[in-house]
Image (cartoon, rainbow, N blue to C red):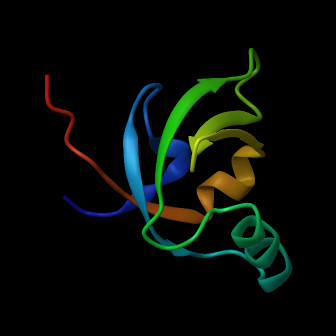
């Protein structure tokens, strides 16, 4: 599967972080919070108006602005039943 934006992930979808297309300052802040290349994350939910989004990464929940999530390229993981 090809990489796409974290903001495009459906609720409950799991993905592996592939790369960042964000300014250095924002990228560094997100990396300090555990969003590193290769980390697995799950989209938990969208806020009522669609922004921010809540993800689970490394066992904790993190809220991101949709604009930040659009700059994070992910590779979706296939879920097994």
x, y percent for residue 51: 76, 32
Q: Is residue 22 above or below residue 40?
A: below
Q: How many marks?
A: 0
* Residue drawn at 70 percent across, 75 percent down: 22
* Residue drawn at 43 percent across, 31 percent down: 10
Q: Is residue 21 above or below residue 70?
A: below
- For this view, does 15 lie left or right of residue 1? right
- For this view, does 4 lie left or right of residue 7? left
Q: Is residue 12 above or below residue 69?
A: above
x, y percent for residue 36: 57, 70
x, y percent for residue 71: 62, 64
- The outermost residue toward the top is 48
* Residue drawn at 68 percent across, 34 percent down: 53
- The outermost residue toward the bottom is 24
Q: Quadrant of the N terminus?
A: bottom left
Image quadrant where residue 55 sits = top right
Q: Is residue 10 above or below residue 19?
A: above
x, y percent for residue 33: 75, 61
- For this view, does 23 lie left or right of residue 70? right
- The outermost residue toward the left is 81
* Residue drawn at 60 percent across, 23 percent down: 45
Q: Quadrant of the C terminus?
A: top left
């Amino acid at each position: 599967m090809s990489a796409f934006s974290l903001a495009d992930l459906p609720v409950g979808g799991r993905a592996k972080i592939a790369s960042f297309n964000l300014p250095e300052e924002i990228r560094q802040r997100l990396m300090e919070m555990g969003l590193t290349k290769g980390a697995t994350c799950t989209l938990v939910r969208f806020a009522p108006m669609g922004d921010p989004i809540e993800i689970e990464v490394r066992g904790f929940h993190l809220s991101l602005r949709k604009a930040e999530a659009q700059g994070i390229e992910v590779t979706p993981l296939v879920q097994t039943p």
